[in-house]
Image: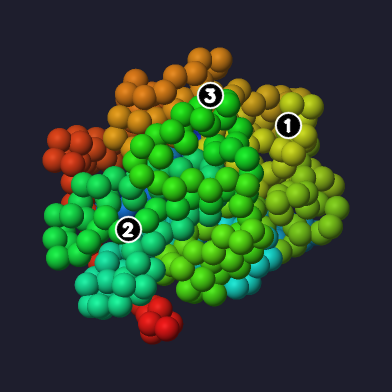
Amino acid sequence: MNIPLSSYPRIVIIGGGFGGVSLAKKLSKKEVQVVLLDKNNYHTFQPLLYQVSTGGLEPGSIAYPLRKVLIGYDNFYFRLAEVDNVDPLKKKINTNIGDLSYDYLVVATGSETNFFGNEEIEKNAMSMKSVPQSLNLRSLILENFEQALLTDDYHERDALMNFVIVGGGPTGVELSGALAEIKKGILPKDYPDLDTRRAQINIVQGGDCLLPGFSAQASKKAEDFLEELGVQVWKGVRVTGYNGKTVTTKTDLVFETATVVWAAGVKGAGIKGLDAVDLIAGGNRINVNEFNQVKGHPDIFAIGDIACMVTEDYPRGHPMVAQPAIQQGKLLGENLERLLTQKSMKPFEYIDKGSMATIGRNKAVCDIKGYRFQGVFAWFVWMFVHLFFLIGFRNKMVVFINWVYNYIRFDREARLIIRPFRRDYSQFKD
C-alpha cells in the first residue's frame, strides 16, 4: 500500500463512517500513524439518503471526501480499499490492494440491510443504505411513472404507481412521508396526463406501532401525520416474500407493486477473521467490552453499528444510529493515547441525546432528554440538528439552500434519471 514505516504506532481504521471519521479527527494531534481504509473515497451522511432517493437533494450534498477530512493531519493516510480478511495472529489485514500490518486495529464497518435470510426479497426489493442504492431507487421511482404513461392497462398502471415500504422505523417513516409529498405536490405537475391520485404509498410494520424506540406519543403522532398525507399504514403485518410483482404477508393482505423498499432492519457489516461464533452477537455485531475491545484481542477494537457492547441499560447493545458511533470514536481516540502511555482506559458511557424523525413539510417528532414535541417546532429542530452534523461548510449551505428552495417552491429539482435502473415490466401485464 506504500505506507511508509514510522517509529509511531500504526492504527488502522476500517471504515469512514461516523465512527471512523470521529476517531480519525480525535487522533489528529497524537503521536501515531493512522491509516484509514474504505471502499468509497467519501463519507456518507446516511440520515439524509432518503432525500436523495426522492429527489430532494443531490448525492454530492450529503457526501464528503475522506481525504479532505484528513487534510493538514500529520502521519495520516487514506487508501481506497476493500478489506477481505483480518489475521489477528499476524496482526495483518488482507485487502484487494495488498496487505498491511497494524499495531492497533479499529473496525468501524457500520451496518448493512438485513433481509433476515429471505433471498427472494433480497433479490427483488430495493435497499437504501448507500449513495448508489439511493440513486437506483430514485431512478426506479421515476422510471415507474414513465412506464405508467405507456400502458393503457389499469392493473399494470396501478402496480407501477403502488409503493410499499417495509419497516416502520425512522427510515421507513421519513421515506413514506417524502413519497406522499411528491404525490401531492409534484406528480400532478410532472404528469398531467396521468391520474396520479391513484398512486399509493403503503408502509408495512411487523410490530404494533411505528417508530419503535420512540415514545408512544411520538409514535402515534407520526402515524397521524402519515395518514394526513394519505399514506396507508399497516401495523402487525409481517412481509414474507416479494417476487418482483407480488408482496405476500403472513395475513391475507397482498400487494401488487413494482417498488418495494426494504427498511425493516440492519445488521453489522461483518469482516472475515473476526467472525468466530464466540465473537458475534445478535445482528451480526462483534462483541466488545466497555472499552470497545474485541473479546480475546486487546489490540483490536470495534465501534459504531458493528460493535455490540452489552450493558444493563442496553442488553442488546447500543442503538445502531450515528450518536453511539460518534461518541465511541471520540472516547476511543482518548483511550488509545492512554493505552500508549500505559494509563488505564475510560469505560464508555453512552449519552442518549434523543431521537427524531421528520414526516414531511412542517411535520416531525422529537424525543429529546425527556422533552417530547411534534409539529413545526420539531421540524425546525430536526433540520438544525442534521445541518449541524453534516461534514463540510459547503454541504451545510447546499442542503440549507435546497431545503429553503423546496419549501418555498414545494419542489424537488433533483428528480433526474442519471443512472437508469432497468427492470422487466412484462410481468405486470398478466
The residue at the point 36 percent across, 37 percent down is 228
- In this figure, which colouring scheme has been used for the structure? rainbow
Q: Where is residue 154 in the image (x, y as percent from the top left)?
A: 31, 72
Looking at the rendered structure, the secondary structure element under dot 3 is helix
- Circle 3 sits on which residue? 217
Residue beneath the point at 34% across and 20% down: 377
Residue at left offset 25%, top offset 58%:
196
- Mark positioned earlier in the residue sequence (3 or 1): 3
Which residue corresponds to mark 2? 199
Q: Pick the quarter of the image with the C terminus.
A: bottom left
Nearer-the-camera pick, 159 or 130: 159
Is 188 on the left or on the right of 335, as rendered?
left
Q: Is residue 111 visible?
A: no
Q: Nearer the viewer, mark 3 or mark 1?
A: 3
Counting from the top left corner in percent of width and height, residue 13 is at 58, 49
* Residue of label 1: 314
Separation of residues labelled 2 and 3 (CA atoms): 29 Å
